C-alpha cells in the first residue's frame, strides 16, 4: 500500500543501461527487481529523450518494504553525459544523493557497492552528535548515482526491527543548495512540511574529519547548514537540504535525460495543492498529465523543478 502525503515513494535515476545498472545495484543492496519493462513513447518524450528513442525502466525495492524504492530509466543510443558532471559534494544543484542505512555492518555494504562500481569521496567517517554516534560514507558511480551509507552506533536504531538484510530502504535524499532560506521556505512555508532536524555548524568534526572529501585542514572552518523536512515530520521519504559556506560550481541548470538522480516521487492526495505550493515556492511546472506508474497503475502527475534544479513529482493514483 502506498502512503499518501508521507514523503517520497521512490527515487528516479537516469543511467546508461537500466537493466545492467539495476542488477548491479540490487545485488549490492540485497534488493529485489520488482518491475522491468519498456517505456511508452509519451513518457520517454516527457523526460526529454530524443523522438523515437527506446526507453527502458526497472524498479528495485527492499524485499521487506514497498516504499523507498529505486526506479532506473535508460534510453537507446549513446549514453548521455552526467547531470552533475565533475561535481564535488559541496557543489549546488539537482539531487545530490540518496541515504540508506547499513543495518549490520557498513564496511561490508561499502565493499559491496565498491564491487558494483561505486567509489567514495572519503573513507568511512565516524560522527558524534551529542549522544548520537554514526558512521557514514558517501560514494558515487559512473552513472552519477550518489549513495550515502549510514550506520547508527549509539543509541540503538529504532523502527527497523522488521527490516531484514544489511541495507535499509531509501529513507532520505539530499539536495545541496546555494540559498538555504529559499529552499527551506519551499518545504516549510509553501508545502507545509515539518522540520525533522535543523543544524547550524561546520563541515568537519575535530581534526576536520568529514565524509564529503573536504580538506581536513579546512573543513572545521567551513560553515554548513542542514535541514531535513517531511510532510509528517518523519525521517522516511524525507528531503534534506545542505548549504556550505564556500563557493562552488552550480549544476542547477542540468536536466534529465542526462544521467544521475533525476526525481523524487511523492504520492499526494491533493495534486492541485501540490502544484500551487511548488509554483508559489518559485518552482517551474515542467510536466503534467496522466502516466502509467508501473506496476501500480494509472496516475495523474505534476512534475516541478526547484530553483536549484531538483525535480519533485506529485502523483495521484486512480
Image: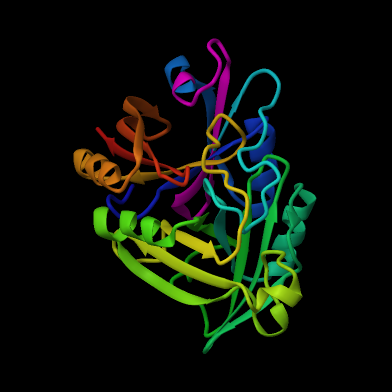
| Residue farthest toward the bottom in the current orientation of the protein | 131
Question: What residue sits 66% from the left and 28% below the top?
Answer: 80
User: In the rendering, at what x and y percent does residue 290 appear?
Assistant: 31, 25
Whether residue 168 sits left or right of residue 27 in the image: it is left
**Range drawn in magenta:** 45-71
Name the residue located 63 percent from the left edge and 32 percent from the top edge: 18
Q: Residue at x 71, y 74 (%)?
A: 218
Figure quadrant of the C terminus: top left
Find the residue positioned furthest to the right: 115
| Most foreground residue, 167 or 133 | 133
Q: Is residue 259 left or right of residue 198?
A: right
Q: Is residue 59 magenta?
A: yes
Q: Is residue 218 left or right of residue 301?
A: right
Residue sitting nearer the eye, 57 or 65: 57
Residue 216 drawn at (x, y percent): 75, 75
294 in magenta = no
Residue 149 image-quadrant placement: bottom right
Q: Observer-nearest residue: 105 or 90?
A: 90
Whether residue 44 is situated above or below residue 70 in the rendered picture: above
Colour treatment of the image: rainbow
> Can residue 66 be seen by looking at this rendering?
yes
| Residue 41, percent from left and from top | 47, 15
Horizontal and vertical percent for residue 275? 26, 40
Amino acid at each position: 500500500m502506498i502512503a499518501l502525503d508521507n514523503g517520497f515513494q521512490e527515487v528516479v535515476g537516469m543511467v546508461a543501461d537500466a537493466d545492467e545498472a539495476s542488477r548491479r545495484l540490487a545485488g549490492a543492496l540485497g534488493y529485489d527487481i520488482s518491475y522491468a519493462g519498456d517505456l511508452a513513447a509519451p513518457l520517454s518524450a516527457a523526460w526529454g529523450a530524443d523522438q523515437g528513442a527506446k526507453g527502458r525502466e526497472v524498479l528495485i525495492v527492499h524485499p521487506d518494504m514497498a516504499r523507498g524504492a529505486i526506479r532506473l530509466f535508460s534510453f537507446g543510443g549513446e549514453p548521455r553525459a552526467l547531470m552533475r558532471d565533475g561535481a564535488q559534494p559541496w557543489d549546488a544543484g539537482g539531487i545530490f544523493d540518496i541515504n540508506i542505512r547499513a543495518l549490520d555492518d557498513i564496511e561490508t555494504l561499502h565493499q559491496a557497492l565498491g564491487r558494483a562500481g561505486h567509489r567514495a569521496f572519503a573513507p568511512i567517517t565516524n560522527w558524534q552528535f551529542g549522544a548520537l554516534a554514526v558512521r557514514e560514507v558517501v560514494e558515487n558511480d559512473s552513472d552519477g548515482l550518489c549513495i550515502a551509507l549510514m550506520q547508527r552506533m549509539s543509541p540503538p536504531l529504532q523502527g527497523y526491527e522488521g527490516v531484514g538484510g544489511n541495507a535499509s530502504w531509501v529513507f532520505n535524499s539530499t539536495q545541496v543548495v546555494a540559498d538555504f532560506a529559499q529552499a527551506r521556505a519551499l518545504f516549510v512555508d509553501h508545502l507545509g512540511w515539518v522540520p525533522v532536524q535543523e543544524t547550524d555548524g561546520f563541515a568537519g568534526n575535530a581534526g576536520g574529519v568529514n565524509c564529503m572529501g573536504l580538506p581536513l585542514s579546512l573543513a572545521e572552518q567551513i560553515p554548513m547548514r542542514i535541514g531535513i523536512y517531511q510532510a509528517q515530520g518523519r525521517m522516511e521519504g524525507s528531503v534534506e537540504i545542505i548549504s556550505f559556506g564556500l563557493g562552488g560550481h552550480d549544476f542547477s541548470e542540468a536536466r534529465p535525460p542526462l544521467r544521475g538522480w533525476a526525481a523524487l516521487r511523492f504520492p499526494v492526495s491533493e495534486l492541485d495543492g501540490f502544484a500551487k505550493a511548488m509554483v508559489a515556492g518559485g518552482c517551474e511546472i515542467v510536466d503534467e498529465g496522466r502516466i502509467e506508474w508501473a506496476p501500480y497503475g494509472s496516475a495523474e502527475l505534476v512534475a516541478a523543478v526547484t530553483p536549484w534544479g531538483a525535480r519533485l513529482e506529485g502523483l495521484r493514483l486512480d
